[in-house]
Amino acid sequence: MSRKYDHLSDVETFVTVVERGSLTAAAVALSTTPSVISRALARLEARLGTQLLRRTTRSLGLTDAGRLYLEQTRAALALIDDAERAVQAEGGDVTGRIRISAPTTYGHYRLPALLQRFAERYPAVRVDLNISNRNVDLAAENFDFAIRQGVLKDSGMIARKLEDARLVLVCAPAYARRKGLPRNLEELARHDCLTFLLPSTGRAFPWQLMQDGEELDWPPESALQVTDDALGTVSLAEAGLGICQTFRFIVQDRIDRGVLLEVLPELQGRARPFSLIYTPQRRMTAAARALLASFLGQA
């Protein structure tokens, strides 16, 4: 006797292909190959006796039958997800796997404490962490969450703010002895201001300052410029090569130990937000919901 629902994996494949937009992206999401994806779709269409997708080398589209089938199967899979979450909640143990991407600044200096708190409460959940300054494609690369800094453009993502991180100007005592400390913005312009070049534009990221109660975006200039990893400016400043602006949570310990000095505190006070983002289309597992609540301090 054959099993009535032994084709459910093919159904999941079909839904994933539509959501990801291509066989290749679906293969990445399901950790398989495009040829396996193609065979699964062929089996499903043969079982149903109708074509679900119109596939060419450049495009992918739903037939009328495929559109109807997608609507119904999505609803059915959602019910299965709800049933699993209900059972997990009843049993008290949350399991599963979560993929997160975070920039180096947050990944090294803020995320460990958040993950420690989460791991203590949900030890059965596996977390795959990507620390990189590349903006990953959450849907195509199968990430549950990403942490991003700054004001986010409207991209169809859901963003939940983690914090507003304060900024600070710092230099090493050796630099201060050699060059002195600036007393105002005019003098700061004559110092070695370590710059970080934005990957998207190749331009120096402006320092975000406060002057006379007004916000000021000030363009630093230096013969020494850093690309890709903003933490590089902190390392260079610590080595005595100049002044940098960074997040206070990165350097507060070094300030307390005298390894770095604050520069022009009267020009400081600005902050940049860090947010946890996720796609509204991706249905959250119990593990993902638990992490979201934990990171936002709601669990």
Image: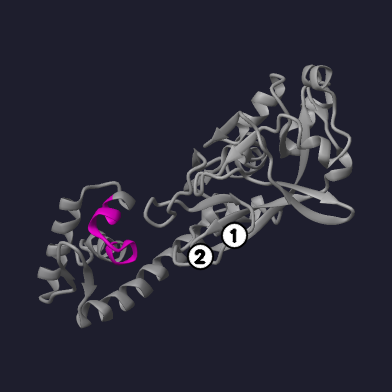
- Left or right: where 85 falls relative to 263: left
In this view, 123 is above or below 17: above
Q: Quadrant of the C terminus?
A: bottom right
- Left or right: where 23 falls relative to 241: left
Write the residue at 55% across / 67% down: 154
Question: Which residue lies under the disc numbered 2?
Answer: 155
Q: How is the image coloured?
A: one colour
Q: Position of residue 21 (x, y in %)?
A: 30, 63
Residue in front for this viewpoint, 82 or 279? 279
Q: Which residues are magenta?
A: 17-27
Image marks 2 and 1: residues in contact by CB distance under 8 Å = yes
Residue 61 placement: quadrant: bottom left
Write the residue at 77% across / 53% down: 216
Write the residue at 87% across / 39% down: 184
Q: In this figure, what is the number of numbered marks?
A: 2
Write the residue at 71% across / 22% down: 238
- Residue 1 can be seen in this image: no
Q: Callout 1: helix, strand or loop?
A: loop
In this view, 128 is above or below 222: below
Residue in front for this viewpoint, 48 or 57? 57
> Label 2 is placed on what type of residue?
Ser
> Label 1 is placed on what type of residue?
Leu
Residue in front for this viewpoint, 189 or 299? 189
Q: Quadrant of the N terminus?
A: bottom left
Q: Callout 2: helix, strand or loop?
A: loop
Q: Position of residue 244 (x, y in %)?
A: 71, 33
- Residue 130 can be seen in this image: yes
Question: Which residue lies under the disc numbered 1?
Answer: 152
